[in-house]
Image: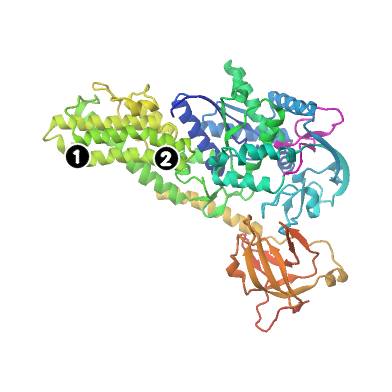
Amino acid sequence: MSTTGRYTITAALPYTNGPIHIGHLAGVYVPADIYSRYLRITGNDVAFICGSDEHGAAIPMRAKKEGVSPKVIIDKYHAIIKKSFSDFGISFDNYSRTSAPIHHETASEFFKKMYEDDKFIEETSEQLYDPEANQFLADRFVTGTCPKCGHEEAYGDQCEKCGSSLNATDLINPKSTISGAKPVLKQTKHWFLPLDQYEDFLKEWILKGHKKDWKPNVYGQIKSWIDDGLRPRAVTRDLDWGIPVPVEGAEGKVLYVWFDAPIGYISSTKEWAAREGKDWEPYWKDKDTKLVHFIGKDNIVFHCIIFPSMLKAEGSYVLPENVPANEFLNLEGNKLSTSKNWAVWLHEYLEEFPDKQDVLRYVLTANAPETKDNDFTWKDFQARNNNELVAIFGNFINRVVVLTHKYYNGIIPTPDTFSEVDEQTLKELRAYPAVISSSIERYRFREASQELMNVARLGNKYLADEEPWKLIKTDEARTKTVMYVALQIASALATLSEPFLPFTSSKLKHILDQSAIQWNDVAKKEVLLSEGHQIQKGELLFSKIEDSDIQKQLDKLEATKKANEAENKAVEPQKDTATFDDFTKLDLRVGIIVEAEKMPKTKKLLVLKVDTGINTRTIVSGIAEHFTPEEVIGKKVTVLVNLAPRKLRGVESEGMILMTETPQGKLVFLNPDEDDVNAGAVIS
């Protein structure tokens, strides 16, 4: 990095309705920590900020499920999460929580400033209300059928099946998760952020500005949202858990969590600055400060459209320099799922592998989902530890330290004349800080981790070629030079590994009795460890992971899988009684899919042409993640042909194809297989 500066680095605030798992680490916290540690070691002024997100509907929902108060839930998981991060070596400058008084004060002031500046619009609208529980229903307290893909358990804000953003009033057959009652519509007043008024600003700032150097997945999602047209978004909710709306006439209302949570970055910075005797404002209001948000892809819209619009509306804050969002990490071929316990939980990992924080950091970085969803497997975890960390990095350091003590009692020898190989090796070594810096500064942490490993490979190759264990018998002077060069590589590794492997770096610095060498010293200094310097006795930096250790983890996942399958085998309860007349209204026919194509700009929708015997009609179906267009052409399917047409992404869908789902989550057609059943045959 050519110049130093001030950075505010934020990592997405984790919800305190459960612990941290490897998906969170790979997507957000490990890359954010690598970047922050790198910035510090290269001389920058860094505020690395995070905290627990303790508001929103998910918290009281979890509390209701466990039969306790929301405060019990947030205190429990805040403690687990904070300790896990600390034990894992995530180097936050401050880890706060949104239940803290300073956050309530900061969020309230932010809202009031925007309110007084007329940045909101007030609207009275009809919202779903539970007549049995006598309360309005926040989005997550309503489930129903998704109007876009037909999934029957969509939430009021999002369908987790097709990923569509929804309003609770869009749901078909909505149901309250509190009482199970059918909600009614009731008028209520809320304040909205008119995002449509910020379209020109966002287009200028992101689309026409310099943001094309942002990750393609981030830029593409933002462009899609803007191109689709932005609409006002409510910033308040009828809920009894959260920050009370600080204006008259807003009794019983709280700030919507998506408005309150990102302000948590600001309040956490204030908390840190007060503790450290600093001024918080330059970290958020000085135009020379670079603000970088580390998030997962499900938070892109909040950090690239909504929060920047809030900052712009408030008027005194800097805007994000970059938002390097990662994709999702899967586990052993399946999506991570908190509800199904399909995860590797950080606090459990730290108990089962207490000295292997850096192993998990390395594996999650080397396999990071930077441009596409990736898969974590325990076999890959074992292989990367044994074949890379142990066999390459650890092996090189162990040989260097052992031989230095064996030949020179741990004292760095005085080198003789440098050969061409020595000069070339040292030249390559001095090039690595710039190479690794380039990767980190472009948020390519996976690439950077492999370049770090190449430094260890350089050392191994040098020792293997020069063979000091043989040379010592014939040429002591040359052996001293070889060991001196190898020790310079070891010293460089101690410094360059710090952002990626902080525990390993600390151990190695202790072994080498090294403390003052900085990142740029590796590139510029002729000597990193001087002749005559005494190093300590060696210790293994990494140890092999045995097959039995991995089998325990696989057995645990297999038990989880079986438990989930047993739960899925439970038969769905019978729905409300239908009359014969209700049933006869359904016109179910055999159809044949004659054409199929993916709907542009969606992952989950196929546009099908189906011969129903009556006619050939268009049906949009959310099956693209399970079937390719080629696979479904010619299939006989069961079609509900008299369903009212509905537009999905601008395409009118004229029916619904009946399907079921296996316990493993695979969609299956309910198809009539008999050869002599033709399109249009009535199913009765």
In the image shown, does 590 or 206 lie closer to the viewer? Answer: 206
Highlighted magenta segment, given as a residue range: 230-258
Locate the N terminus and report the quarter of the image it occupies: top left
Circle 2 Cα neighbour tier, 10 Å, few/some/many (<14 / 14–19 / ≥20): many
User: The residue tagged with tag 2: helix, strand or loop?
Assistant: helix
Vertical order, 467 against 562 (above or below): above
Q: Which residue is mark 2?
A: 449
Residue 233 belongs to magenta span: yes
Locate the C terminus and report the quarter of the image it occupies: bottom right
Residue placed furthest toward the left: 474
Q: Is residue 379 left or right of residue 123?
A: left
Q: Which residue is mark 1?
A: 467
- Residue 672 coordinates in the image, percent (x, y): 68, 76
Vertical order, 122 against 611 (above or below): above
Q: Is residue 266 left or right of residue 385?
A: right
Disc ID at residue 147: none
Q: Residue, x 87% and y 48% (percent of image)?
A: 185
Q: Is residue 34 left or right of residue 577?
A: left
Q: Determine which quarter of the picture holds residue 362.
A: top left
Q: Is residue 131 visible?
A: no
